[in-house]
Image (tube, rainbow, N blue to C red):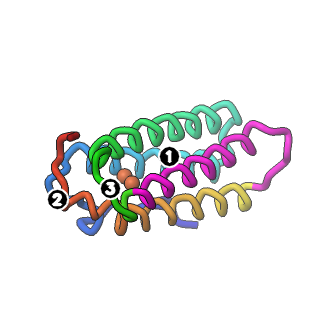
Amino acid sequence: MPTELLLWSHHCVIYNHTRVNEQHAHLFESVNKLYLRIKDNAKQDTVLANAEALYQDTVTHFREEEALFSECTGDQFTLHRLQHKHYLEALRGFCDRLHSDINLSVESLTDQLRHLADWYQAHILTSDKQLEDISSTPH
Ligand SMILES: [Fe+2]
Ligand SMILES: [Fe+2]
């Protein structure tokens, strides 16, 4: 298995949005850290703490990102907000499964996290890239 799920590259950079890039890079690190913890069979408390931190940081990031296009209208922004909502629901579901008594294998958990990570990377490369067309300060 690879040691990292998400690899930062110049393709991920959103021009003129330094704070967004910093948050994306931080979230990549958090996903990779959680992946390693799960893969190494770390104590459940540690895995849960990492997963909840990732969830909270993602909530904060989406809120700040949405403030950048809060006054923008059009299908692409409506879709962007919905994508955030659905991703958070999926990430919440993942955290809830970690909290549950269900005995999930390392393979199952890493598969679930890989699915979330793939979605997140694709989101940056498509929807978040559209932020390049708007100002880096909220309207
Ligand atoms: Fe986004
Ligand atoms: Fe983003």
| Residue shown at the point (80%, 52%) measured from the top left | 104
Span shown in magenta: 78-105
Mark 3: which secondary structure? Answer: loop
Whichever of labels 2 and 1 marks the residue nearer the N terminus, that label is 2
**Residue 133 appears at what percent x and percent y?**
19, 61
Task: Tell me where residue 44 sits by quadrant.
Answer: top right
**Residue 19 appears at what percent x and percent y?**
23, 43
Q: Nearer the viewer, mark 2 or mark 3?
A: 3
Pointer 3 residue: 73
| Vertical placement of residue 59 versus 13, above or below | above
Pointer 2 residue: 15
Whichever of labels 3 and 1 marks the residue nearer the N terminus, that label is 1
| Amino acid bearing label 1 | Lys
Q: Is residue 97 left or right of residue 112?
A: right
Residue density around tag 1, few if under 14, some if 14–19, many if 20 or more, within 10 Å: some
Pointer 1 residue: 33
**Residue 56 appears at what percent x and percent y?**
50, 34
Q: CA distance from mark 2 to mark 3?
A: 21 Å
In this view of the protein, which residue sits in the foreground, 120 or 72? 72
Whichever of labels 2 and 3 marks the residue nearer the N terminus, that label is 2
